[in-house]
Image (cartoon, grey):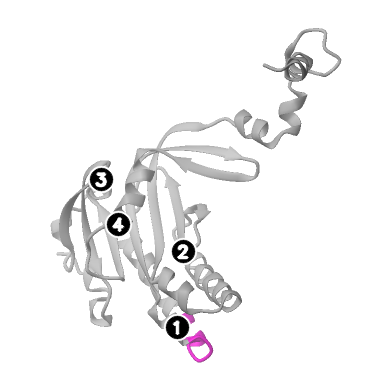
């Protein structure tokens, strides 16, 4: 440790210093981040809505036009958040929603996705004349349930936990579709009085990821005649 660093260190932490203890952390953004306290021990829903075709769209479109298009599409998703999920973050091509407490009925989660998809497609139709590349875009949804921790950095709230990691991994699935709603086995188990066999139109899969085996049911929305049929459970 250099002489100048030792002097700086003593000025912050030693008793009797002219510099008030922890003033460094009050002024330093990293120090502020360290001081934030996590809120832990809550179960809830993690819901990710992801834009399919995003990378290809970015390559094909002008930067300023593309940013405006994506901004409008993300806004159309958020404005149809009828179940009042909170937003943890917007990740460029995806929105991470979450909600503490019991799970919502699966049929309502699917209805919300369908409303988001309708609004998204309407937005695509409006911008198609000026940005035809936007027609390659669509959305998919992952819905998961588990333990969630939350922490705050400055004005931003973030969620953390194994269930959050698992939800992100599920975006890397092997579903041969760009437009679908995926509901995990853990979410189904939380929904009272409903099981996967009661829903028509869904396909069940289990896949191995670096976090272990994850099982889910997905509902394809590639064709308009698939819409709402998933809600006609027995």
Question: What is the C-alpha distance between the residues marked 3 and 1?
Answer: 37 Å
Furthest residue to the bottom? Answer: 129
Mark 2 or 4 closer to N-term? 2
Q: Look at the image and say whether residue 102 sits in the magenta stretch.
A: no
Q: Look at the image and say whether residue 124 sits in the magenta stretch.
A: yes
Contact check, label 4 and label 3, Cβ < 8 Å? no
Camera-side residue of 19 and 5: 5
As displayed, is residue 58 above or below residue 169? below
Q: Residues within 10 Å of mark 2 (few under 14, many from 20)?
A: some
Question: What is the C-alpha distance between the residues marked 3 and 2?
Answer: 25 Å
User: Which residue is denoted by mark 2 in the rendering?
Assistant: 93
Question: What is the C-alpha distance between the residues marked 2 and 4?
Answer: 14 Å
Q: Which of marks 4 and 3 is in front?
A: 4
Q: What element carries label 3?
A: helix
As displayed, is residue 183 above or below residue 211? below
Q: Can residue 105 be seen in this view?
A: no
| Residue 204 falls left or right of residue 105 | left
Q: Is mark 1 on a helix, strand or loop?
A: helix
Contact check, label 3 and label 1, Cβ < 8 Å? no
| Residue 180 falls left or right of residue 137 | left
User: Which residue is denoted by mark 1 in the rendering?
Assistant: 133
Q: Which residue is drawn at 61% across and 75% down?
A: 64
What mark, if any, has residue 186 been given in the picture?
3
Mark 3 or 2 closer to N-term? 2
Mark 1 or 2 closer to N-term? 2
User: Which residue is denoted by mark 4 in the rendering?
Assistant: 172
Q: Nearer the viewer, mark 3 or mark 2?
A: 2
x, y percent for residue 167: 34, 50
As displayed, is residue 101 above or below residue 134? above
């Amino acid at each position: 440790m250099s002489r100048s660093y030792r002097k700086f260190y003593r000025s912050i932490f030693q008793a009797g210093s002219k510099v008030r203890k922890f003033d460094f952390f009050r002024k330093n953004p990293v120090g502020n981040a360290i001081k934030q306290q996590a809120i832990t021990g809550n179960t809830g829903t993690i819901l990710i809505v992801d834009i399919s075709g995003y990378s290809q769209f970015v390559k094909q479109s002008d930067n300023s036009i593309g940013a405006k298009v994506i901004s409008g599409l993300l806004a159309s998703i958020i404005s149809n958040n009828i179940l009042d999920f909170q937003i943890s973050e917007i990740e460029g091509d995806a929105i991470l929603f979450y909600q503490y407490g019991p799970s919502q009925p699966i049929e309502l989660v699917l209805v919300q996705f369908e409303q988001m998809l309708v609004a998204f497609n309407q937005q695509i139709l409006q911008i198609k004349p000026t940005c035809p590349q936007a027609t390659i875009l669509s959305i998919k949804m992952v819905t998961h349930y588990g333990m969630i921790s939350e922490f705050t950095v400055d004005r931003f709230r973030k969620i953390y936990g194994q269930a959050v990691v698992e939800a992100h991994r599920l975006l890397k699935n092997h579903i041969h579709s760009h437009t679908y709603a995926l509901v995990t086995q853990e979410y189904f188990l939380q929904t009272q009085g409903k099981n996967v066999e009661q829903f028509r139109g869904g396909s069940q899969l289990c896949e191995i990821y670096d976090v272990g085996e994850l099982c889910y049911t997905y509902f394809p929305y590639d064709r308009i005649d698939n819409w709402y049929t998933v809600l006609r459970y027995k």
